[in-house]
Amino acid sequence: MNQLDIEGAAGLSVRGARQVPGATQAYDKLVDDGVAAKLVDKDPTLWGPAAEAESKIRLGWVDTHRRGRELLPQLAELRKELTARGLDHVVLAGMGGSSLAPEVITATLGKELTILDTTDPHQIRRALGDRLSRTVVVVASKSGSTVETDSHRRAYLAAFEEAGLDDIGGRFVVVTDPGSPFEGTAREMGAHVVLADPEVGGRYSALTAFGLVPSALAGVDVAELLDQADEFHASLAGDTGNPALALGAALGAAALSGRDKVALISDGTGIIGLGDWAEQLLAESTGKEGRGILPVVVETPTSPGAIGSDVLTVTYGGALGPDAVPGAGVDPHLSVNGPLGAQFLAWEFATAIAGRVIGINPFDQPNVAESKENTNRILDSGLPSASPSFVDGAIEVYGTGSSLAEAVHHMLSAAEPGGYVAVMAYLDRFGDAAVAEVRSLLAAQTGRAVTFGWGPRFLHSTGQYHKGGPQEGAFLQITGAVTDDSPVPGKPYTFGELIAAQAGGDRQALSGRHRPLLHLHLTDRKAGIAQLLEALRKG
């Protein structure tokens, strides 16, 4: 990498952007069109007439960090009140944009936050059994209609009541949009209510109440994040010294020139989990109309999938000295380094810019509702009956072949040339964490871009790309037997039935697009994961 090819502002640097084929031309065109200044001014016409109405109500993220300061006194007082009551275990019930940023913030800054972004009954039961009397639950949802977060709220409400705890409503903090149905529900519960910026979509909400409230209650000095973003904001309107503009031009140009997969890799310099947050931002913002940028979160710079002829390799971190190697072991196309508050704003700005370059609306998510609607139909009528093609040890195989290895090979061989493989695990992301190794094993075996998502949370992230992006994916869905189910209070189904319906709904959405799909059901989770990993290691 040419060390002189660096765009920097407010402690954040982007290296390598000008070396991406087509990026300089894209950058110059953006400058000629005055795009950076127009975006800072929240011009909704930047993405074309069809996107204007949506853009007009979704550009608050550009300066929401300034309005976020108004929350600081309320958050300080709320934390003081909760701590005085002994409520020092913070649980965040949220999906997608409501949970990913707080997870990055607290992990990076060394604060404990329990994230509940699943409907897996084992993971939920474990959370409910952890320090219940000391728990405050932050329920984060713009409307309150998200089935996962509503189910979490119901489960904790019932658990608090069963434990005979006092002031149950006061053990909840609800983050929602002003005037949403959820605001009314929260006030009826007697919950603490913090209203978010209504002109910011979920995946752009890192520096709104959705990111700030759980992080502050967990003990993070969120004012520092806002300071970092504010300092970086001064660079956004410029035609030079604008790293976010350079990043966006490079992402868009790479996608147009054939590098439409972006490997997101931590360089180990102090930011934890930013790739998972950026994955949602990029996939849900750009994956539509048969186009898009597919983010691939890669474990380390030397893991399989970090490089490839169709991959833009991007490393990120908190800081790099002038003589440091940006890729920590590989030579990335781009490296993005700087403080976390600036990172959030830089990636949001760059994603909006990339959307203009590739010609899509970065603020809608037209295909997200499809799997939700399928899920609701299944909950109403039940899962369609299906028998496995065959059983191999602890795995029921719904696919083509006579062995597990043969079924996996058939799925992989059916993938499009230049396409990708998506692993979708509807399991417990802590108890069943070992299954994540499937990603690197498949990437090493195939040389393809391979993504890994925990269901159902990826439905709020890469799920949009799967349906709306280029139809070139092959899909491996992994589900598991439920041995300790729990009812969803007030609903005619259990958490086990809910997650099965979500997996079934997603299968229907993918099958309806005639995509290669292999479904593996683990009749014994631990044994099934071990068996699958062993089969993949043998190739």
Image (cartoon, helix red, strand yellow):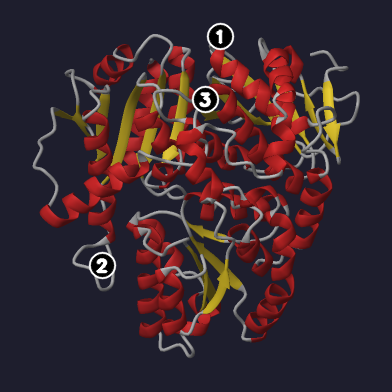
Label 3: how many Cα within 10 Å (few below 14, some 14–19, many 20+)? some
The residue drawn where x is 58% and y is 64% is 196
C-alpha separation, residue under disc 2 versus residue under disc 1: 48 Å
**Disc on the earlier residue, 2 or 3:** 3
The residue drawn where x is 36% and y is 62% is 145
Residue type at the position of mark 2: Pro
C-alpha separation, residue under disc 2 versus residue under disc 3: 45 Å
The label shown at residue 359 is 3
Quarter the N terminus occupies: top right
For the residues bearing labels 2 and 1, Cβ distance under 8 angstroms: no
Quarter the C terminus occupies: top left
- Residue behind mark 2: 487
Taking the image as shown, residue 278 lies to the left or right of residue 14, namely left
Residue 208 position within the rendered picture, expressed as x and y whole percent measured from the top left = 63, 58
Label 2: how many Cα within 10 Å (few below 14, some 14–19, many 20+)? some
Q: Nearer the viewer, residue 96 or 348?
A: 348
- Residue behind mark 1: 309
Could you tell me which secondary element the residue under label 2 belongs to? loop
**Disc on the earlier residue, 2 or 1:** 1
Residue 284 showing in the rendered view: no
Residue type at the position of mark 1: Ser
Residue 286 position within the rendered picture, expressed as x and y whole percent measured from the top left = 50, 31
Q: Nearer the viewer, residue 387 or 528?
A: 387
Taking the image as shown, residue 476 lies to the left or right of residue 341, namely left
Residue 329 position within the rendered picture, expressed as x and y whole percent measured from the top left = 73, 20
Could you tell me which secondary element the residue under label 1 belongs to? loop
Residue type at the position of mark 3: Gly
